[in-house]
């Protein structure tokens, strides 16, 4: 899928105009940063010790989500944990845009010339 295709551009543009831009404007008006732009000085370290030192085969084969519905659920849960209820409410729109973008890429098995392929 090309992010400049008319279908993708219209969907993503509408999502930006209807959800992302108003949420950003709301944050700025409230004196909040729309997204972190620097490390949080209250956090001593972002390092988290891993429960296991080495990866297993399952780590490489386990899906991060089980599909678009699971993606939507996890995205909403993530934004709710961050206190971004407006974005959490828009998770279905983000999942729909992801579903549409995925479908646009299914029409060809060719690797994009913009992707560097290593043999």
Image: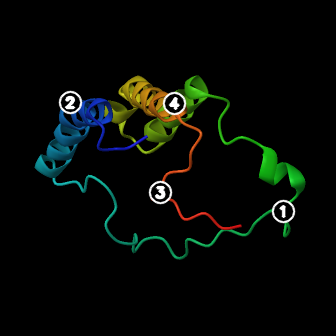
| Comes first in the chain, label 1 or label 2 | 2
Name the element at disc 4.
helix
Judged by depth in the image, the label closer to the viewer, 4 or 1, is 4
117 shown above or below 91: below
Q: Residue at x 80, y 46 (%)?
A: 61
Judged by depth in the image, the label closer to the viewer, 2 or 4, is 4
Judged by depth in the image, the label closer to the viewer, 3 or 2, is 3
Marks 4/1: CA–CA distance? 34 Å
| Comes first in the chain, label 4 or label 1 | 1
Q: Residue at x 43, y 71 (%)?
A: 42
| Comes first in the chain, label 4 or label 3 | 4
* Residue 95 horizontal side relative to residue 90, left or right: right
Question: Furthest-left residue in view?
Answer: 29
Please name the residue that numbered disc 4 is placed on.
107
Q: Where in the figure is residue 54, as x and y percent of width and height? A: 86, 68
| Comes first in the chain, label 3 or label 2 | 2
Marks 1/2: CA–CA distance? 41 Å
Please name the residue that numbered disc 3 is placed on.
113
Name the element at disc 3.
loop
Please name the residue that numbered disc 1 is placed on.
55
Circles 4, 1 touching at the beta carbon (< 8 Å): no
Marks 2/4: CA–CA distance? 28 Å
Q: Nearer the viewer, residue 107 or 87?
A: 107
Q: Where in the figure is residue 66, as x and y percent of width and height? A: 68, 30
Q: Residue at x 18, y 35 (%)?
A: 17
Please name the residue that numbered disc 2 is placed on.
18
* Residue 9 horizontal side relative to residue 70, left or right: left
Name the element at disc 1.
loop
Marks 1/3: CA–CA distance? 32 Å
74 shown above or below 57: above
Circles 3, 2 touching at the beta carbon (< 8 Å): no
Among the 4 quarters of the image, the one containing residue 85:
top left
């Amino acid at each position: 899928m090309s992010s400049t295709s008319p279908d993708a551009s219209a969907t993503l543009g509408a999502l930006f105009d209807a959800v992302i831009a108003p949420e950003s404007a709301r944050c700025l008006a409230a004196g909040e940063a729309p997204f972190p732009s620097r490390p949080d000085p209250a956090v001593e370290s972002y390092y988290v010790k891993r429960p296991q030192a080495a990866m297993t085969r399952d780590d490489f084969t386990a899906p991060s989500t089980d599909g678009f519905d699971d993606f939507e659920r996890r995205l909403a849960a993530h934004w709710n944990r961050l206190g971004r209820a407006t974005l959490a409410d828009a998770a279905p729109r983000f999942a729909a845009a992801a579903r549409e973008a995925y479908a646009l890429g299914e029409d060809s098995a060719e690797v994009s010339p913009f992707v560097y392929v290593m043999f």
